[in-house]
């Protein structure tokens, strides 16, 4: 259970982030619901948590902005006095074949998916170190584990997150701080909605379990990595993918 804990979930207005925020609140955590563009959806997430008897607040921040993340950390610590769980979930895709990929599409994906996680970890690690406890969970992807044609930028960002996870895990382990990554496979959200039926069928065919996953499947794994039940686990990548990365 997460009673008394404070959690921050980036990109929690919709999709996987929203499911994680709701799941952590259900376990008793007070949750900061970060958003960038989706203010109304973030407020909806907060409302859903409050209606279930939990506590949450929405905070806007573009995670790719280093100084905005410093402000976010300041606001969270002023409001709650601590942070126990940091979930770096915010992410985007800008797919395309390498020969046609623009510099802008490459940079944008790296800035949000990878630098965004660096920014929050950088600004919250003094708090974790002072507390001598904390759980950092980075949402990577099977694309970062296996690579994926048409996703050079996205796969690079997600593989980079795995390197970031392992290095920071080594740096912070002696202070009781756990840093792990989740690598979801094909999860039904707005991110995957845009795919054609043919492309979806092809992906499902490559999943040993022959079915897609749901945001709640990822949220359950996040709840485990956020809980003291996983206190002896750090630097790991847990695939939530129906067997895709076997
Ligand atoms: P989604 O429905 O498209 O949601 C993306 C989230 O990221 C939104 O909440 C969005 O917030 C947030 N975001 C984007 N740019 C941001 C920024 N600059 N600052 C703060 N937040 C930002 O995608 P999803 O499927 O839930 O994906 C969530 C995470 O899981 C991503 O990291 C994704 O790469 C990863 N993942 C997804 C799948 C899948 O199959 N769906 C598989 C593997 C990994 P706003 O709308 O407020 O901007």
Image (tube, rainbow, N blue to C red):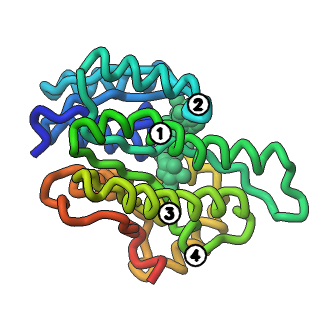
- The numbered mark, 2 or 3, whose residue comes first in the sequence reads 2
Residue 35: image location, x then y, percent: 48, 28
Eyeballing the image, is 176 above or below 63?
below
Measure the C-alpha gap from mark 1 to mark 3: 16 Å
- Where is residue 47, by image quadrant? top left
Residue marked by disc 2: 66
Residue marked by disc 3: 162
Q: Are marks 2 and 1 in contact (CB under 8 Å)?
A: yes
Residue marked by disc 1: 122
> Would residue 146 be visible to someone looking at this image?
yes
Eyeballing the image, is 125 above or below 70?
below
> Would residue 189 be visible to someone looking at this image?
no
- The numbered mark, 4 or 1, whose residue comes first in the sequence reads 1
Q: Is mark 1 within 8 Å of ligand 1?
A: no
Closer mark to the observer between disc 4 and disc 2: 2
Residue 7: image location, x then y, percent: 28, 35
Q: Secondary structure at mark 4?
A: helix
- The numbered mark, 4 or 3, whose residue comes first in the sequence reads 4
Measure the C-alpha gap from mark 4 to mark 3: 12 Å
Residue sitting at 26 percent across and 45 percent down? 134
Q: Are marks 2 and 3 in contact (CB under 8 Å)?
A: no
């Amino acid at each position: 259970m997460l009673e008394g804990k404070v959690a921050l979930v980036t990109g929690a207005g919709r999709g996987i982030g929203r499911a994680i925020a709701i799941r952590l609140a259900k376990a008793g955590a007070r949750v900061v619901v970060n958003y960038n563009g989706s203010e109304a959806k973030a407020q909806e997430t907060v409302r859903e948590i409050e209606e279930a008897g939990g506590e949450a607040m929405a905070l806007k921040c573009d995670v790719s902005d280093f100084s905005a993340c410093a402000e976010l950390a300041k606001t969270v610590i002023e409001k709650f006095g601590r942070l126990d769980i940091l979930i770096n979930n915010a992410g985007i895709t800008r797919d395309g074949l390498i020969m046609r990929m623009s510099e802008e599409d490459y940079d944008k994906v790296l800035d949000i998916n990878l630098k965004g996680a660096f920014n929050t970890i950088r600004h919250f690690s003094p708090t974790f170190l002072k507390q001598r406890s904390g759980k950092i969970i980075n949402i990577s992807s099977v694309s970062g584990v296996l690579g994926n044609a048409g996703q050079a930028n996205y796969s690079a960002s997600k593989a980079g997150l795995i390197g970031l996870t392992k290095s920071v895990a080594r740096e912070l382990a002696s202070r009781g701080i756990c840093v792990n990554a989740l690598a979801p496979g094909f999860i039904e959200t707005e991110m995957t909605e845009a795919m054609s039926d043919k492309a979806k069928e092809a992906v499902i065919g490559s999943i040993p379990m022959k079915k897609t996953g749901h945001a709640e499947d990822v949220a359950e794994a996040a709840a485990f990595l956020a809980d003291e039940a996983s206190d002896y686990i750090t630097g790991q990548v847990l695939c939530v993918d129906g067997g895709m990365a076997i």
